[in-house]
Amino acid sequence: MARAVSRFVCSACGAVTPKWAGRCEACGAWNTIAEEAAPGPAATSLGPARGRRTALTTLSAMDPPPPRQPSGVLELDRVLGGGLVPASAILVGGDPGIGKSTLLLQTAAAFARAGLPAIYVTGEEATAQVQMRAARLGLAGAPLALAAETNLRDILTTLEAEAPGLAIIDSIQTVWSDQVESAPGSVAQVRASAHELTRLAKRRGISVILVGHVTKEGQIAGPRVVEHMVDTVLYFEGERGHQFRILRAVKNRFGPADEIGVFEMTGQGLAEVPTPSALFLSDRSAPVPGTVVFAGIEGSRPLLTEIQALVAPSPLATPRRTVVGWDGARLATVLAVLEARAGVSFTGMDVYLNIAGGLRIAEPAADLAVAAALVSARQDTALAAETVVFGEISLSGALRPVAQAAARLREAGKLGFRAAHLPAGVKTEGDTSLEINTFQELSGFIHGVFGAIEA
């Protein structure tokens, strides 16, 4: 009897090694290598078993765009690029308890009510639990088929027989195949299950949505190859202490990436937020030191958010640097530029930075707003009321223009803002109702807005 052969695969990058190691040599990740059974020998004959010739086309050939099925949930359709594309595979990830199952149950019910046959397959709950949630959300009357199953073979057989337009698998980590000799949730099981479900989606024209757990670093658990298999990768973000939830597209073959949809968690489930800028801003009746409104861009939509900073004397030898919703390394860079290029020192001071509403900001256009909030908190001087700030700060202390400035200013004007501070050279694309103040250097911005800075 032939001896079973096994191999060791990194769950982060998919690299294969002959033996186990604590650190992957390919990507450098720790504790990501797991054992799995090696695949059987592949056929090597190129005689009668040769492949068929593939049809070729040219770049000038214009194929019609794929049809889309809108759900009626505008925020969801926005993230998907206008609606659900038939035969597409979508991966949705998010922290435990953030509301993924609630979102997808509402999504399945919305598509079912729009005329698209849908099946919701749960591997983490009993059907009675899903039915109770549906009753609480007011979805009991939706024409949605429900099943509780984890065996991949049974799931594929059911979907082949029913041929729905949409199938939701909650979650891919609970699905297991009897063709793979490893435990459910392992690298091999997740990869094999995702591969078979994606093949089914392409072969039968069924749109498949897979729910994926995330690691403590915020990445979808399992091999990264799963993200390459699917057409769209969505992340459901938010803080449990806040009622807002962000659905963000980080990959989309049928629409723009980094598009977001904003939802609010209520007692009746997730509700759409058509104008998120107004909700991410607190009461602006009186200016507050350390608070600055940033005009940002998330995907294709402008979004105004409030950046809050607090600076206090530190009793510690190494002052604290606490950041929520922004990159900590970026904060360290801004603090260094403020001291080296503008003469504003934060030595011996604790610095706390927070993005209001639980939103996460990644674009460098927030640099100038963060610097303004830090200086405002340090000097205990509030920025002028009804003012927005945006711009990128270079290491030389110069202010760099950012893209889509006109959209940012239009959004600020709609919400009643009267002035804007931004880098020189920004293209505003016409007249605006706001008073525009431009600056070349960070030092000029600080002295022009806050005056002389105390040592």
Image: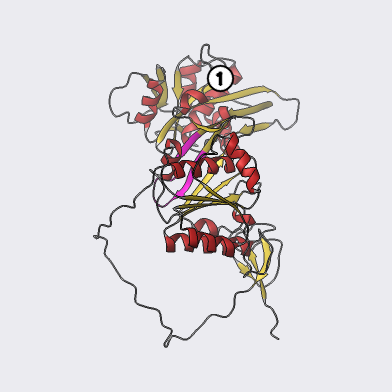
Does residue 325 appear in this view?
A: no
Per the rendered image, the range of residues in magenta is 247-262
Residue 379 covered by magenta stretch: no
Kind of residue sitting beneath label 1: Ser
Q: Residue at x 41, y 21 (%)?
A: 420
* Number of marks: 1
Image quadrant in which the N terminus is located: bottom right
Residues packed near mark 1 inside 10 Å, few (<14), some (14 to 19) or many (20 plus): many
Q: Is residue 336 left or right of residue 278?
A: right
Whether residue 420 is situated above or below residue 163 in the rendered picture: above
Image quadrant in which the C terminus is located: top right
Q: Which residue is at the far bottom? A: 47
Report the residue marked by disc 1: 376
Q: Position of residue 72 (x, y in %)?
A: 41, 38
Question: Which is more toward the observer, 326 or 134?
Answer: 134
As helix, strand or loop, the secondary structure at mark 1 comes to helix
Whether residue 359 is situated above or below residue 177 in the rendered picture: above
Residue 248 covered by magenta stretch: yes
Q: Quadrant of residue 100?
A: top right
Q: Position of residue 285 (x, y in %)?
A: 51, 11
Q: Position of residue 248 (x, y in %)?
A: 49, 41
